[in-house]
């Protein structure tokens, strides 16, 4: 949304949030529950980076809210992480002319000294161009890595470009760079940097690494195109820190037959610290929780529905740290199906499955139920998100993926702009309705549910 | 624009900018000249706050560029201002829960001590509500002033709400507040604060004053609606500073009859320091300059066209400091018409006049020439901008106003987002074409041009 919602609408939403305790247990207003959760987490907790005191407050908030909503077996499963603590992140071009750059340190960046570092810029239009640079060629330099990410419905631009953030710093370090700056992995044109972790390869020496906003990257690209030598001064004092507390929050809608494997519905509670984690991922917690309540409102389900509000997803790699912990703690419990909502609050447009051939009738039944809601069935295999992937892979659990519209997701993802106003209540409600439809079917499936086909 | 322009287009634009010296004097590519000026000022100079070293660099850049474009009589008219120097601007809610607020100090805010101040928040939904508070009622408090600005084509939402910034801090100070924070005067929903000056009333004691982004203001409004007492910690070390150098840059397209009063076309060269002054107001300088060249390309005009790239508009009040200086220095020179471009780079949709009844035939002729370009004639009286108002009022010069589409202007105005990517080259070119049409008519008007009707 480019323009702010009119004040009247804002006040209506405020009123809705204010009414949280009354509406929270009202099954007729599940959209209200989902929105209340997003409003509550963003207003009453705010940013909640993995391992921070704020994430601990978020766990307390989550326990209280799930209990108030009538969930059973609400509890925290604590664990410890190697975290990342925000310091002062600043950058500026010092040549050809001084200009401030909007930057954020990448997760697990090495800190600069407090006085910062400065170096000549080596500009690479792509990650492949950086890979082609000779070893040692970048000694003493600050590498800049550009790319050209596009916005699209399925979010595939992210997968194509996030390697710049994940691998670029390691490659730059191995070639001798003293620092690395990337164009943010994002599709907006605002002066807001996109956070996110980098994965230091084995034996790679961590160096200071940051992402600048797209307009700042454009400025660097213009100078590069004009052949003007650039220098960047970097002060990134954000730094890794071991032994920080995190935890998963769990709650259940008990099934009529507790002996049957449960349905797992996951989101994550932590958020990057620049914004307030509305789309990433308070929305997901709101959606799965409101949907579970909507199923309960239609009558106690056969199977237990377990909601997992995972901790420490953001600082994880291919798997969230909370997701890995869940897989360990619950390694011996069978699960019927695993699902995750972690792609914002815009409408669901597609369903995909990862289920064995024996599961085809169930998948067909779900797809048929979603068809009148305008949801198409994708030809691909469902992939779980970071919170369910570890347990789903270890236990070969069937996965159902409800794909959300990602067109504007990476405008906001991991930036300061991830705030409540970015939530479209109507699309949030559509998510809840679609999720409730699917959860209602699988939680009432009497026969054995076959595992993943993967 | 929500999404970044595709890389191919970016590169094309870069190429265009790179070709500046070649295209600068090519009258067939006036859009090229306008865009080159915006690209040059934002890339080669960057932010250029009134009185800063960067504004001085901008003057040197402007002189070189106007000379390269073949303007005559290119020179700087220096003056001194009471400026405003950017320090560290930070704010956070400390209650009900800690949350960072995105803030910028208002121009001429009093600084806080380096350690900051903290106080209980007194929330006012409107400026009128603040006015109604009893004197002394706000002793020791930090006032927050809300409002509900809307985006619209004619930009009238600004006039309706900018009083919050201009007058609010004075009113809060008089009632005993120790600090004041306002909702940014802007229509976006990004975590970017909108800068701008406040006018301290006579005998008002300046206090620290800042503007938070709209999403941050929403957070404060939600807490207020929920009745949760708030505290804000403010560190605003930006501060006024006297005796800083500024200056107006002037260039001319000499007319065939130098004895006739000249046509004045103005923009301003300075910019707020958070962004790079692309829409405010490199675009205006690009438009008037390219249009003057387009007139020259059609044959030497009868009257001289003078372009004024004014200094220090942003820190002025109803009149820019550069505009006031121009009126003083050129008090004895008659002018035929005064025009100004200072409302971004989006399309011109309306023409209005401030001219005596004797000028009606000329106005009719201009309106008729613009009609095929889709420009409507407004029923209102033209008002000049801050750069021409002082000279136009003092000398009763006829004013012609070309209204630009302001729908998205206040999304960007005075924020870090005022960067080159916000310029739509096609709409910029439309501005140049419309301006060239009007300048061509008035600069070739042989008879006396009647003054303003105001």
Image: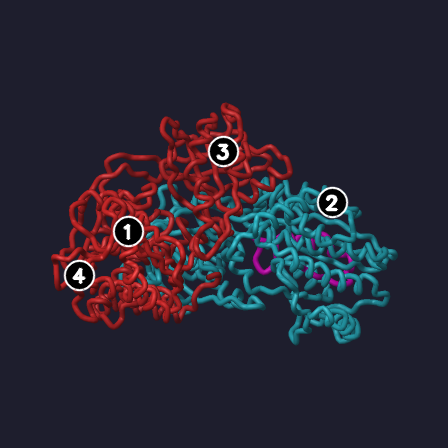
Chain colours: A cyan, B red
Q: Where is residue A280 in the image (x, y as percent from the top left)?
A: 59, 54
Please identify the quarter of the rendering in which residue A68 is found.
Answer: top right
Q: Position of residue B423 (x, y in %)?
A: 38, 61
SS assignment at label 2: strand
Chain at tag 2 = A
Looking at the rendered image, the disc whose residue lies closer to the viewer, 1 or 2, is: 1
Chain at tag 1 = B
User: Does label 1 lie on the same chain as label 3?
Assistant: yes
Return the residue at label 3.
B233
A338 to B332, vertically: above or below: below
Return the residue at label 1.
B452
Distance between the alpha carbons at the discs numbered 1 and 2: 75 Å
**Is residue A163 or residue B187 the one in the foreground?**
B187
Return the residue at label 2.
A75
Badge 3 or badge 1: first in the primary sequence: 3
User: Does label 4 lie on the same chain as label 2?
Assistant: no
Looking at the rendered image, the disc whose residue lies closer to the viewer, 3 or 4, is: 4
Q: In this view, does B369 lie to the left or right of B444?
A: right
Asked if the residues shown at circle 2 and circle 4 are in contact, with their CB atoms under 8 angstroms apart, the answer is no
Badge number at residue B303:
4
Looking at the rendered image, the disc whose residue lies closer to the viewer, 1 or 4, is: 1
Looking at the rendered image, the disc whose residue lies closer to the viewer, 3 or 1, is: 1
> For mark 4, does the 10 Å Cα neighbourhood hold few (<14), some (14 to 19), or many (20 or more) residues?
many
């Amino acid at each position: 949304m480019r323009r702010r919602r009119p004040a009247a609408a804002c006040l209506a939403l405020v009123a809705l949030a204010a009414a949280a305790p009354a509406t929270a247990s009202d099954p007729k207003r599940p959209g209200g529950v989902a929105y209340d959760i997003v409003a509550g987490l963003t207003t009453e907790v705010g940013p909640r980076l993995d391992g921070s005191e704020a994430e601990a407050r978020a766990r307390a908030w989550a326990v209280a809210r799930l209990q108030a909503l009538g969930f059973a077996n609400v509890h925290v499963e604590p664990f410890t992480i190697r975290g990342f603590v925000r310091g002062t992140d600043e950058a500026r071009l010092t040549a050809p002319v001084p200009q401030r750059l909007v930057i954020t340190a990448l997760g697990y960046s090495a800190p600069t000294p407090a006085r910062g570092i400065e170096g000549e810029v080596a500009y690479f239009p792509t990650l492949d161009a950086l890979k082609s640079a000779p070893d040692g060629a970048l000694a003493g330099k600050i590498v800049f890595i550009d790319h050209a990410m596009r916005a699209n419905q399925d979010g595939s631009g992210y997968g194509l470009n996030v390697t710049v953030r994940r691998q670029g710093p390691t490659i730059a370090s191995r070639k001798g760079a003293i620092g690395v700056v990337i164009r943010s992995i994002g599709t907006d044109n605002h002066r807001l940097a996109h956070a996110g972790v980098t994965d230091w390869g084995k034996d790679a020496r961590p160096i200071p690494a940051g992402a600048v906003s797209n307009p700042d990257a454009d400025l660097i690209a213009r100078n590069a195109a004009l052949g003007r030598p650039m220098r960047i001064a970097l002060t990134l004092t954000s730094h890794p820190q071991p032994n920080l507390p995190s935890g998963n929050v769990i709650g259940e809608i008990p099934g009529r037959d507790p002996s049957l494997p449960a349905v797992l519905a996951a989101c994550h509670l932590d958020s990057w610290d620049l914004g307030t984690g509305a789309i990433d991922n308070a929305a997901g917690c709101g959606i799965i929780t409101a949907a579970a309540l909507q199923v309960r409102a239609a009558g106690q389900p056969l199977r237990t529905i377990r909601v997992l509000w995972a901790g420490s997803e953001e600082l994880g790699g291919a798997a969230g740290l909370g997701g890995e912990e869940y897989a360990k703690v619950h390694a011996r419990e069978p699960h019927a199906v695993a699902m995750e909502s972690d792609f914002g609050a815009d409408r669901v447009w597609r369903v995909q499955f990862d289920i064995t051939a024996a599961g085809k009738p169930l998948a067909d039944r779900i797809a048929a139920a979603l068809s009148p809601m305008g949801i198409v069935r994708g030809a691909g295999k469902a992939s779980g998100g970071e919170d369910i992937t570890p347990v789903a892979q270890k236990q070969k659990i069937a996965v159902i993926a409800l794909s959300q519209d990602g067109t504007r997701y990476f405008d906001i993802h991991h930036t300061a702009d991830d705030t409540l106003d970015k939530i479209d209540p109507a699309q949030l409600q559509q998510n809840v309705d679609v999720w409730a439809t699917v959860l209602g079917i699988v939680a009432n499936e009497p026969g054995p549910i076959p595992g993943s086909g993967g």
